[in-house]
Amino acid sequence: PQLLASATAAALAADPRRLLLLLDTPLYGTLGALAGDMPSLRCCQQVAIPQADLGHYFEMLRGGGFYPGVRAQRLDHWLCANAGLGLRCLLAFLDYECRLAGSLQAKLCPAADVMRYFRFGYPAEPTSVLALTVGLEPPAETVEEVDAFVQREAALNGYAVELLESWKYRMATLLYVVRRV
């Protein structure tokens, strides 16, 4: 972990367009876990956290323990708005509380966000990490079906993804290494 932390810190310091892209809550569970190995992330604008819920957004700004780049924006809007800036993600942790096909009520579609992530070229080169958490419900009811979608979308856009590990519970988290082909 320390070697990975050093390499990540060096990559962030070398290029201000390199980011860690997280979907997180006001409790900063994901960022807190990462900052355990890399304390400099506690106050780092290269940690981009789009937050669509304005109540959560203001809570995140008030919390004194962290100072990341929280944006009052949905992820789909963030991906589109920043597509031309040359931003590249060393790590993207897309932690959704819905199925891959999304939630009509919440106007949220993780599958479309994954497509935008690859189509707009957000993965850093030569390698980056993508973690995706979604519910296992139709039309992607298994880890294999979610993986097949991610593999296909990556390949369509000139990337190869290697599934390193997956965890299955009520939801599933899939951890990938992403490389440009």
Image (cartoon, rainbow, N blue to C red):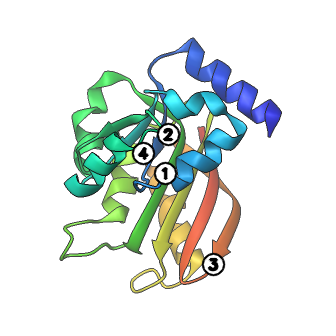
Task: Say which of marks 1 and 2 sits in front.
Answer: 2
**Residue of label 1:** 28
Label 1 packing within 10 angstroms: few (<14), some (14-19), many (20+)? many
Task: Say which of marks 4 and 2 sits in front.
Answer: 2
Q: On screen, 171 above or below 37?
A: below
Instruction: Work out how far the residue at label 2 is from the one at label 3, CA to CA, in angstroms.
Output: 31 Å
When asked about the image quadrant of residue 121, the answer is top left
> What residue is drawn where x is 37% and y is 23%?
86
Number of the label disc, if any, that sits on residue 65: 2
Instruction: Work out how far the residue at label 1 is from the one at label 2, CA to CA, in angstroms.
Output: 9 Å
When asked about the image quadrant of residue 40, the answer is top right
| Residues tagged 1 and 2 counted as in contact (Cβ below 8 A) | yes
Q: Earlier in the sequence, mark 1 or mark 3?
A: 1
Task: Say which of marks 4 and 1 sits in front.
Answer: 1
**Residue of label 3:** 168
Label 2 packing within 10 angstroms: few (<14), some (14-19), many (20+)? few
Name the residue type under label 1.
Tyr
Tally of marks: 4
**Residue 143 visible within the image:** yes
Name the residue type under label 2.
Gly
50 vs 150, left or right, is left
**Residue 75 visible within the image:** no
Give x and y (percent) for residue 151.
Answer: 54, 59
Q: On screen, 91 above or below 46?
A: below
**Residue of label 4:** 118
Task: Say which of marks 3 and 4 sits in front.
Answer: 3
Instruction: Work out how far the residue at label 4 is from the one at label 1, CA to CA, in angstroms.
Output: 25 Å
Instruction: Work out how far the residue at label 3 is from the one at label 4, CA to CA, in angstroms.
Output: 24 Å
Q: Earlier in the sequence, mark 1 or mark 2?
A: 1
Q: Earlier in the sequence, mark 2 or mark 3?
A: 2
> What residue is drawn where x is 67% and y is 68%?
166
Name the residue type under label 4.
Phe
